[in-house]
Each structure stands twice: as structure tokens, then as C-alpha cells.
Amino acid sequence: MTPELAGYRRETSMDVLLADAPQHVPVELIRDLDIYAIQAIDPDIHTAWRKLQSESPALIYSRCNGGHWIPMRAHVIERVLSDSETFINGGAWVPPNPPDALPLIPIQSDGALHRAYRSLIMPYLVGKPLLRAVDSARTLAIALIDQIADQGACDFAVDFAQHLPIQVFLSLVDLPSTDRLYLAELAEVVRMPDEKVRMEAFGKMYAYVAGYVDERIANPGSDMISAIANGTIQGRPLTRDEIIGECTQVLVGGLDTVASMMGFIAAHLATNAPLRQRLCAEPHLIEKRVDEIIRRFGVAGPARQAVADVKIDGILIKSGDPIFVATALHGLDDSRWSDPMTIDLDRTASGPDYQTFGSGPHRCPGAALARSEIILFLEEWLKRIPDFSLVPAKPMVTASGSVNGVLSLPLEWQV
Ligand code: HEM
């Protein structure tokens, strides 16, 4: 029996057929949780994840989307992410990408090759390039907020949050700001369960990136695309497919993740006056305690594949089994954090222990950048619009999938 809960499928639909569970999966661990159909609860998708977590065992198996495991508790998430020998990224995606799909790099690679790919992008996500990208995002944030502050209302997701990370990407790779709206449309790719639609969307992204790759091979600059396009790994130049796969990953990785996290934070602050007022009164807490805020709003859901038979909590995961890691569940686990749903600005233990940015060799290389974007958003927004609320007639629209997303967030305030 599947529980009557948002996110659980009660019947087989035509588009996402339920796979048979493999024989080694104990029947009591089967929950047909469709990661693309988690319904937010009032208005928070994290409340829905927390409810699913509290009613599930530590590890469950869903037959949706081709069939896969989902670690529901922090200790299982930590085990899977930290053991990159047993749980590889490979071509992992839920549902699986077709074998001939262009791999996203570095996320769908492992071992020494993965490290080599990563070394090409890391210099652009720290130090001066990071500061430049954050400066450019802050300038845009101030301009956007100044534009909307007098209006007394906005769709936070569309009018504000989606713009910032795209501007950051465009600054890192030295591309024109005019591409922003086109990229915002493509960002939805991370939540497309239908393989055909998803592959078409990725095709558009690859085509977008490919045009610039060719240009930067001919005329290299000092930006990230030029470095990837003209770089070498393990003593050889990258193939054109590898270059496009890596540039696309940097683009996909930073778009919807940052925008959605800002959306979840804004919605939470809109309904939580004491927290909002404290951040306004003590703005130094924004930078000091941003990790506690980030812990509460995990958004990314990376995939893994077991390459050996392994037991977790006595449960057999077999070689070949896919695993979907909802990082949000780590920050919501009450056996890991006391009172996890509360953002406690006096909590001292959030630090680097949280897994919103993952852990192990694939830990988000954009974490410092994303963290800075969240800080600058809070600093600049609360300075200019300290009091705001949800719009009861226009509820927030969220979505789930490889990223928990905020598609629309109407907000209003007094002018
Ligand atoms: C709030 C924002 C963000 C969140 C929550 C987030 C989360 C994550 C997580 C959990 C992973 C690990 C995936 C895995 O274990 O397979 C990851 C990987 C990655 N992220 Fe982020 N990310 C964010 C922002 C960014 C930004 C701003 C960038 C780039 C500008 C970025 C680029 C990447 C890349 C390239 C990877 C792949 C790393 C690898 O496979 O080694 N992310 N991210």
C-alpha cells in the first residue's frame, strides 16, 4: 500500500510507467515517490519533503522514473555521497539519460578524469573571477530592486531571482547580458522527467554553448569558456563534445539552483516576521549565519549508480541500482539537526556539515559563489524592502525534480 501523500503515485500514468521493483528490494521499502511530483505544503516544498521523511524508513525504493533508491535520512545521504568508489556518478540521471546522450562534465565523470575536468573550472569560481561575478550580480540586484521597490509587488522568481545567477554566469564566461532571458527559459531543463523533452531542451543549451565555444577556440579570451575550450586534460586537448558538456554543466549547475534557493528563502521570510525583522535589525547576521539558512533549503538532487553490491542499514543495494539523493532531506532530518524546520540564527552547528552543496569529490565547486549570491540578495533586498508578504490570491508555484524549484513567487509590500 502506498501512503496517501503528496509526491506518492496512486496509479500508473501513461507517461511515467512504474517499473517492476527488483527482487532484492524488500517490499516494505517500496514507496512510489515521484520526485517530479512533490506537492508543496503551505507554501513550502521542504515541508512536504519533511513530511515524507518522517513517514518513511531511512532508505526507500521508488518504482517511478525507471526505478531508484532514495536515501531519506542524513546518515544514508552522507554514506552515499562520501563513498565515490561504490556510488559513481557515471551517466547517472533519474530517469536514466539515453546511452548516446552527451555527458554533462564534470558531474557525470569519476576518478582521475573527473579531477582533471574539475581543475579547468575551479580557478574561475574562486578569487578575483568570483569577486568580479559577485560585484556584477550585486550591481544588477540593486538595479532590479530599485526598479520594483516602488511598485509594491512583484513576482520574485521572475522579476528578480532568475536574473542574478544568469548574470553571474554571463560574467564568468564573458557573454552578453542580452542572452539572459533566453537562458532563463532553458533553465527549466532540470525538471523535465520526459526523456525526449529533456533531451530537446539540453540540445538547445548545447547549441547555445557551441556557438560561443567555436568563437573562443578561434579567439581565446581570459574567461572560463576559453579556458575549457583551449585546455588540456591528461595530456590531450578536450574533444568538442567534452568542451560543450563542461560549459553546459557550469551553466546548468548555477542557474536554477541559486534562483530557487533565493525563492524559498524569500517565501520563508515573507511568512516569518520575527526572522525577517532580526535580519533587518542585525544585518551582520546575514553573512555570519547564512549557512544556517542554506541548510534549511537544500534544492539539488544529484544521482548515483552503485557499482558493487553494498549494504546500508542491513539493506542490500545491488550493483547497477540507481540512487536519487535529495540533498534537502539532509538539512531537514531531526536525527541530525534539532528542530530542523526552524532557522535558528543562534545555532552554531550548521557550518560545513550540511550537505546542501553535496560532499565528497563532486561537492559543488560553485558553493562559495552561490553563498555570496545568497548573502548579497539578502543584504540588498532587506535594506530596500524590509517588510513584504505573500499574495494570498496568487500562491507560490513550486516544482520538484533534479532541483526543487520556485517557478513563481508573487510578493507584495506597502509603498
Ligand atoms: C544554491 C546554489 C547551489 C546548490 C544548492 C548547488 C548544489 C550542488 C550539489 C549538491 C552538487 C553535487 C552534485 C553531485 O554530488 O553529484 C553540485 C555540483 C555542481 N555544481 Fe552546484 N550548486 C549551486 C550553485 C552552483 C553554482 C553557482 C555553480 C557554478 C557557477 C555550480 C556548479 C556546479 C558544478 C559544475 C557541479 C558539478 C561538480 C562535480 O561534478 O564535480 N553550482 N552543486
Image (cartoon, helix red, strand yellow):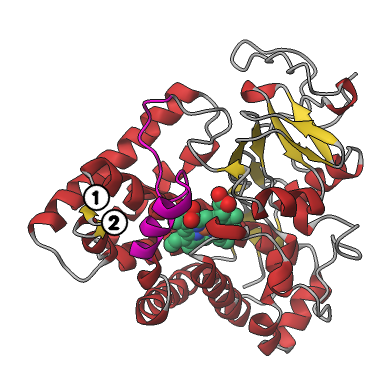
Element at badge 1? loop
Res. 157 image quadrant: bottom right
Horizontal side of 57 relative to 114 (left or right) equals: right
**Residue drawn at the location 36% of the way across and 79% of the way down:** 132
Residue 238 marker: 1
Q: Is residue 156 visible?
A: no
Amino acid type for the residue under numbered disc 1: Leu
Do residues under tags 2 and 1 come within 8 Å of each other at their CB atoms? yes
Q: Nearer the viewer, residue 402 or 108?
A: 108
Element at badge 2? strand
Horizontal side of 324 relative to 7 (left or right) equals: left
Q: Establish if 185 lies above or below 36.
A: below
Horizontal side of 294 relative to 51 (left or right) equals: left
Q: Which residues are magenta?
A: 99-121
104 within the magenta span: yes
Amino acid type for the residue under numbered disc 2: Ile
* Circle 2 residue: 233
Q: Establish if 33 lies above or below 256.
A: above
Callout in the foreground (2, 1): 2
Res. 223 image quadrant: bottom left
Across and down, in percent, residue 250 comes to 40, 55
Across and down, in percent, residue 152 comes to 59, 66
Question: Is the residue marked by circle 2 packed among few (<14), some (14-19), or many (20+) residues within 10 Å?
Answer: some
Q: Establish if 401 lies above or below 280.
A: above
Disc 2 versus disc 1: distance between alpha carbons?
7 Å
Across and down, in percent, residue 346 comes to 83, 81
The quarter of the rendered structure image containing the N terminus is top right
Residue lying farthest to the left in this orientation:
218
